[in-house]
Amino acid sequence: MAKDSEIHDRVSRVEEIIEQLDADECDLDEGTALHEEGEELLAEVREILDEGSGEVVELE
């Protein structure tokens, strides 16, 4: 379950970054830094998912 919280935290941050970029409230340098941070977070999520067993379980 630790992996779930790691993924959730990273995806939540990516969503925050998207909101900031969509709001056009940052300059070019800050926007570039946010974009790079988002790319790194998504790469980490992909890595975590790749480490999984490949089994999908439906929770009720």
Image: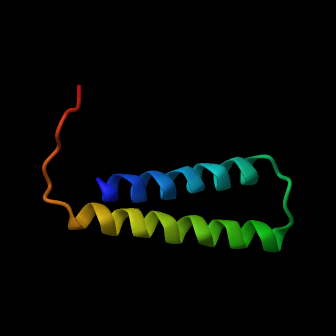
Identify the colour scheme used. rainbow
- In the image: residue 13, left or right of residue 43: right
48 and 18: which is toward the camera = 48
Query: Residue at 66% of width from left, 56% of height from top?
Result: 17
- In the image: residue 3, left or right of residue 27: left
27 and 55: which is toward the camera = 55
- In the image: residue 40, left or right of residue 36: left
- Residue ranking furthest to the front: 2
Residue 29 screen position, x and y as percent: 80, 74
Residue 49 screen position, x and y as percent: 28, 60
18 and 56: which is toward the camera = 56
Q: Which quadrant of the structure image shows residue 58? A: top left
Q: How many marks?
A: 0
Compared to residue 36, the image places residue 23 above or below, namely above
- In the image: residue 53, left or right of residue 26: left
* Figure quadrant of the C terminus: top left
Residue 8 screen position, x and y as percent: 45, 51
Residue 55 screen position, x and y as percent: 13, 49
Query: Residue at 65% of width from left, 51% of height from top?
Result: 16
Query: Residue at 70% of width from left, 73% of height from top?
Result: 33
Query: Residue at 14% of width from left, 55% of height from top?
Result: 54
